[in-house]
Amino acid sequence: MQNQQLQTLMQGGQQMSGSLGFNGNNISKEDEEMSKSALSSFRAKEEEIEKKKLEVKEKVQAQLDRIEEETRRLAIIREELEALSDPMKKEVSTVRKRIDIVNKELKPLGQICQKKEREYKEALELFNEKHKEKVNLISRLMELVGESEKMRMKKLEELNKSIETIQ
C-alpha cells in the first residue's frame, strides 16, 4: 500500500512539474493525507500484532495451567496407586517420567517466547526508524520537485522575455 502511495505521489509530482502553475498547499495536503494513511495503517497493523501476541500468550498460559493441573491430578493418582500396590505401578511410573520430561521441555519454550518478544520489539523499533527516514526522504523529494518547478518557471519566463525583446 505504501508503494502505491509513493507511486501516486511521484506521478503527482511529475504531473505538477509539467504544468505551469505550482500550488504548495496541494502537496502538503497530499503529504499529510499520505502520512495519516500510512500512520493509521501502521497503527492498525501494530494493534493486530499486539492482539495476536496476547492471544498466543493466553494460549500458552492456558496450556501451562492445564499441565500444572494435570500434574497435580496425576500425582494424586500416583499416590493412590502406590498405596494400593496396584499392578499398574510401572505404567504410572512411566507417565510420571513423561510428565517430568514435558515440564523440562516447557522451560526452553518459555525462554524462546521471551526471546521472540525482544526480537519483535527490536524489529518494530527498526521499522519505525526506517519509516521516519522514508517520510523525511519523501518530504525532501517534494521540496526538490517544488524547487525544480520554480526554477523551470523562472527560466521559461526569462526565455519568454528574451523572445519578446527580439521581436
Image: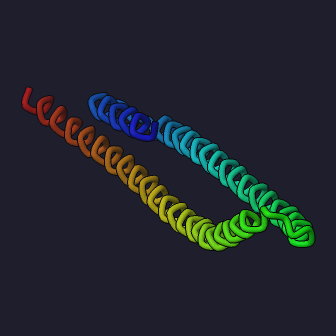
Residue 20 higher or lower than 76, as above or below:
above
Q: Image point 56% across, 38% down: which residue?
A: 33
Percent position of residue 46, x then y:
62, 50
Q: Which residue of the protein is positioned furthest toward the left in this rendering?
A: 166
- Asked which colour scheme the image uses, the reply is rainbow
Residue 113 higher or lower than 54, as above or below? below
Percent x, y for residue 136?
A: 44, 57
Quadrant of the rendering where the C terminus is positioned:
top left
Residue in front for this viewpoint, 116 or 78: 78
Q: Residue furthest top?
A: 167
Determine if residue 29 is in view. yes
Q: At 54% from the left edge and 43% from the top edge, which residue is drawn?
A: 38
Residue 104 % position (x, y): 64, 73
Q: Is residue 133 above or below residue 108?
A: above
Quarter of image, res 130: bottom left
Could you say which is closer to the camera, residue 36 or residue 116?
Answer: 116
Question: Residue at 49% across / 59% down in the picture?
Answer: 127
Quadrant location of residue 162?
A: top left
Near-viewer residue (5 or 148): 5
In the picture, measured across the screen, residue 161 lies left or right of residue 13, that is left
Residue 11, position in %: x, y?
A: 33, 32
How many marks the image carries: the answer is: 0
Residue at (76%, 65%) from the top-left corner? 92
What is the quadrant of residue 78 in the picture? bottom right
Q: Quick one: 156 or 113, which is closer to the camera?
A: 113
Q: Is residue 1 left or right of residue 151?
A: right
* Residue 72 seen: no
